[in-house]
Image: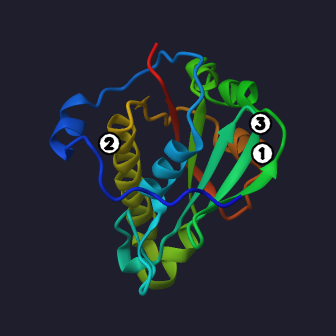
Amino acid sequence: MNLPEPRLKGNVSVEEAINNRRSVRNYAPKKIDVASISQLLWAAQGITDKSRGFRSTPSAGALYPLEIYLVKDEGIYHYIPDGHKLELVSDKNVKEALVKAAHNQAFISEADIDIIVCGVYERAAVRYGDRAVRYTDMEAGHLAQNVFLQAIALGLDSVAIGAFSDSAVSEIVGLPKNSKPLYILPVGYKK
């Protein structure tokens, strides 16, 4: 599924977004439109320099070891930066399974979407050896902050979740063996 082109100018300053960003764990049952989902995914890993393939999140050596999955009631999608599109992974609603995998943090299923950030350490290890884990994890933090600030700019809220069973999330999402879940980022409208 091709996503709408991202907007490159918004109505909220970076300073306002930083000032208003808070961890929110209470979400209203309101759907996020596809244009906003597109904007969030672009902020996470979208291509910002088409000639060189650079993305919105800084990456050591521009190796981009992160993979992004989107979980909605309608299923699981893999974000493809090249072409700015979503690929359907599964049409199953896995929200409740994701809640269980995250030690029963119910707000994960209340948020309209959950962005799953995964690392493929081998991509960075090609150049950086043992430091690949550090650089990949740092990149995941950069990505999460981009998502949080973009969410605020769109009138949405979010929170970072790191407390979950890696193996359970991997199984639920259907991750390849070399992909490790690093974050769950619920995003929605605050209740």
Residue denoted by label 3: 74
| Amino acid type shown at disc 2 | Leu
**Could you tell me how far apart the alpha carbons at marks 1 and 3 are, in whole angstroms?**
18 Å
| Image spot of residue 70 (x, y percent) | 63, 46
Residue in the image at 73% along x and 61% along y: 177
Q: Nearer the viewer, residue 31 or 64?
A: 31
| Image spot of residue 8 (x, y percent) | 34, 59
Where disc 3 sits, the SS reads loop
| Amino acid type shown at disc 3 | Glu
Instruction: State left or right for residue 12 relative to residue 145.
Output: left
Instruction: State left or right for residue 150 relative to residue 35.
Output: left
Residue denoted by label 1: 171
| Amino acid type shown at disc 1 | Glu
| Image spot of residue 186 (x, y percent) | 52, 33
* Quarter occupied by residue 123: bottom right
Around disc 1, counting alpha carbons within 10 Å, would you say few (fewer than 14), some (14 to 19), or many (20 or more)?
few
- On the question of residue 183 being in view, the answer is no
Where disc 1 sits, the SS reads helix
Residue in the image at 57% along x and 37% along y: 33
Residue in the image at 46% along x and 19% along y: 25
Residue denoted by label 2: 149
Instruction: State left or right for residue 187 relative to residue 10.
Output: right
Give yes or no for contact between labels 3 and 2 (Cβ–Cβ under 8 Å). Answer: no
* Quarter occupied by residue 102: top right
